[in-house]
Image (cartoon, rainbow, N blue to C red):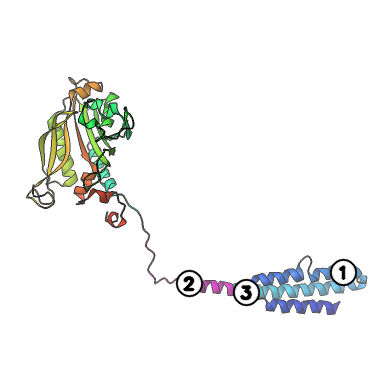
Amino acid sequence: MKEKLKAIRDEAIKQIEASDALEKLNDVRVSFLGKKGELTSVLKSMKDVAPEDRPMVGQLVNETRQAIESILEETKTKLERAAREAQLKSEVIDVTLPAKKNNVGHRHPNTIAQEEVERIFIGMGYEVMEGPEVEYDLYNFEKLNIPANHPAKDEQDTFYINKEIVLRTQTSPVQARVMEQGKLPIRMIAPGRVFRADEVDATHSPSFHQIEGLVIDKNVTFADLKGTLEVFVKELFGESTKIKFRPHHFPFTEPSAEVDVSCFKCGGKGCRFCKGEGWIEILGCGMVHPHVLEMCGIDPDEYSGFAFGVGLERIALLKYEIDDMRLLYENDIRFLKQF
């Protein structure tokens, strides 16, 4: 029995020393110390050993087990250390190399312009309101004093879903919806996407954005409109910006006007940016038509108001000196990362 145990021990040590991986070492452990291992077989055969010899044989078995376990543990430690060193060498980080640039997104030029306009008007006590992009003809046209035979309702200009529903051509329907609620006074702006049947070119798109404003209160005059827009353009384009009103016609306002601002690049002297005129057209405005007030349930003898509308893309194009509207929608990262 002593010779058998010595042979088991020697064979185990030989196989342990020949192991070059932790997996092989574990196989050796199972082969000699597992439930069906060679030492376990010796212990199972103890019933065949004479009773007086069993203590001595048991001691020899335990000594053999301890010897095998000891060298197993030593070899396991060496293999783990070698594996860790190899991993550190293969995964070494050169801290002198430049780091990979993390490309972080940012706001679109349209979003930047919209948030700036909203900030200006919220500072003057206005609310930001929203409405549906798929709108009833009633709100998009009729309640804005645009009758059935008006040219704006032609299918060449407007996307009709059916006879009564359109893709809104302006954000003015939001104004009609708010007036209809009858909560006065009103000070609001309505930014949002609008749709018109335009061909795509440098200054037109079938889908673009508008920001419209509305004020309804007692004793509101054209002077209030002028003062409001003057504050707006000075905040947006600079304190030296001047403002000019030109008579115009809009069905839902009377009187109506187009508004020009002095060129903020040349100060009104004339340059390439303003095409030598010194002025840049920016928005349309006017006093809310009494008939529009009546259709929305507001007494025009007691209340008056003004409205204005500006194209969001136009602000972005002017503010950032972009000469082609299509650049805002082509998602060219080389263009957008400039903002």
For marks 1 and 3 on the same chain, the one whose residue lies earlier in the sequence = 1
Q: Which residue is mark 3?
A: 79
Residue 27 location, quadrant: bottom right
Which amino acid, by three-letter code, is at mark 1?
Answer: Ser
Q: Amino acid at mark 2?
A: Val
Residue where numbered disc 1 is placed: 45
Locate the N terminus and report the quarter of the image it occupies: bottom right
Q: Secondary structure at mark 3?
A: helix
Image quadrant in which the C terminus is located: bottom left
Q: Which residues are magenta?
A: 81-104
Distance from label 2 to label 1 (Cα)?
A: 53 Å
The question of residue 105 being in magenta is answered with no
Q: Secondary structure at mark 1?
A: helix
Residue 195's place in the image compared with 288, above or below, is below
Q: Is residue 104 left or right of residue 84?
A: left
Can you see residue 170? no
Name the residue rendered at 30%, 55% in the picture: 332
Q: Which residue is mark 2?
A: 92
